[in-house]
Amino acid sequence: MENQSAEEIWAKERRLVTLVYILYFIGFATGISAIAGLAIAHAKSGEVDELWQSHLDYQTRTFWYGIAMLITGTVLMFVLIGWLVIIWWFIWTAIRCVKGVMAANEDRVIDDPATWMW
């Protein structure tokens, strides 16, 4: 096996992180691609540079916090406010993914991957 340069590894890790964000975006239409993105984020966690690890942590939390919001929204459908929670989840997830893609593109760390907000 050929040795990869630091630049090649860096670019590969950036592509991996970007792929997960793209799978989350596609997940708005399919659902299943977001699960694939989560699987990738979990599988590569601990194997990447600290900068990219912050993105993988952020992506993992985005998925699980989003699932919690979707379950809450679904339950609240019975009292007719669930739609507001679902709309909030969509906006919240989109903003987090856009923020993540922009940070990854600029080789920036996610400052607080554990945050509930952005």
Image (tube, grey):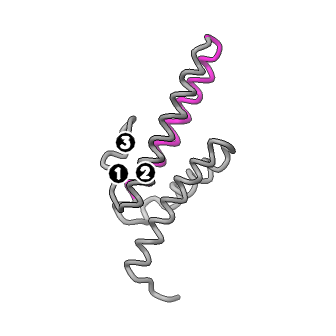
Q: In this view, does 6 lie to the left or right of 2?
A: left
User: Residue at the spot x=67%, y=43% of the render?
Assistant: 29
Which tag is nearer the camera, tag 3 or tag 2? Answer: 2
User: Residue at the spot x=57%, y=15% of the render?
Assistant: 81
Q: How far apart are marks 3 and 2 (CA)?
A: 13 Å
Name above or below for residue 117 compared with residue 60: above
Instruction: Please state the horizontal and vertical placement of residue 24, each as a whole percent of the image.
Output: 57, 48
Q: For numbered disc 2, what is the local secondary structure?
A: helix
Instruction: Please state the horizontal and vertical placement of residue 2, each as a whole percent of the image.
Output: 50, 89
Which tag is nearer the camera, tag 1 or tag 2? Answer: 2
Q: How many marks?
A: 3
- Residue pushed farthest left? 111
Q: In this view, does 69 lie to the left or right of 26?
A: left
The amino acid type found where label 1 is placed reads: Ile
- Please state the extent of the stretch shown in magenta in the rendering: 53-79
User: Of residues 50 and 101, which is closer to you in this image?
Assistant: 101
Which tag is nearer the camera, tag 1 or tag 3? Answer: 1
Residue density around tag 3, few if under 14, some if 14–19, many if 20 or more, within 10 Å: some
Q: Which mark is residue 100?
A: 2
> Residue 62: within the magenta?
yes
Q: Name the residue under label 3.
A: 114
Q: Name the residue under label 1.
A: 110
User: Of residues 71 and 26, which is closer to you in this image?
Assistant: 26
Q: How far apart are marks 1 and 2 (CA)?
A: 7 Å
Q: In this view, does 1 lie to the left or right of 53?
A: right
> Residue 55: within the magenta?
yes
User: Residue at the spot x=30%, y=49% of the render?
Assistant: 111
The amino acid type found where label 2 is placed reads: Gly
Label 3 or label 2, whichever comes before in sequence order: 2
Instruction: Please state the horizontal and vertical placement of residue 3, each as a whole percent of the image.
Output: 45, 87
Instruction: Please state the horizontal and vertical placement of residue 98, each as a whole percent of the image.
Output: 46, 47
